[in-house]
Image: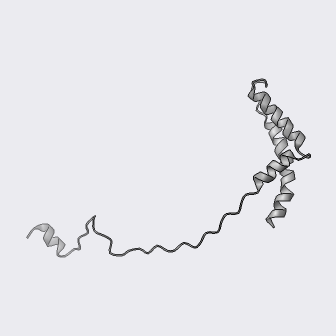
Amino acid sequence: MSLSSFLSSFLPVAYADAPEEKEVKEEEEPAQEEEPEDILPALREECEQSAKCAEATKHFQHCEEKVNAGEGYKGEDCVEEFCAMMHCVDGCVAPKLFAKLK
């Protein structure tokens, strides 16, 4: 009698290729609700083009064009113009967004 057969008579043997004795049942996932469409990008675009924010948007776009064409001063990045535009846009969007979320 070999040592392995002697030990296997006392201890259970597990083989790597052997199928598991217990099959774990996968729990059924509840039906996922569809994610509602994000209306924020459309509202932002609408407000960017509105009369209220048109001047700030135009100023930012002009700055971007100037910088991308290499005509701006060294290190110019249009952050101030962007912040001014987004301040206007966010002020325009907020009441419309919260009215639709109710």
At which x and y percent is residue 46?
Answer: 83, 50
Residue 30's quadrant in the figure?
Answer: bottom right
Image quadrant in which the C terminus is located: bottom right
The relative height of residue 58 versus residue 10 in the rendered view (above or below) is above
Tell me which residue sits at (78%, 23%) in the image.
71
Residue 15's quadrant in the figure?
Answer: bottom left
At which x and y percent is residue 56?
Answer: 87, 40
Viewer-nearest residue: 11 or 100: 100
Tell me which residue sits at (26%, 69%) in the image.
14
The relative height of residue 77 versus residue 35 in the rendered view (above or below) is above
Image quadrant in which the N terminus is located: bottom left
How is the rendered protein coloured? one colour
Left/right placement of residue 27 relative to residue 53 reads: left
At which x and y percent is residue 48?
Answer: 84, 46
Q: Residue furthest right?
A: 51
Left/right placement of residue 30 relative to residue 80 reads: left
Viewer-nearest residue: 79 or 96: 96
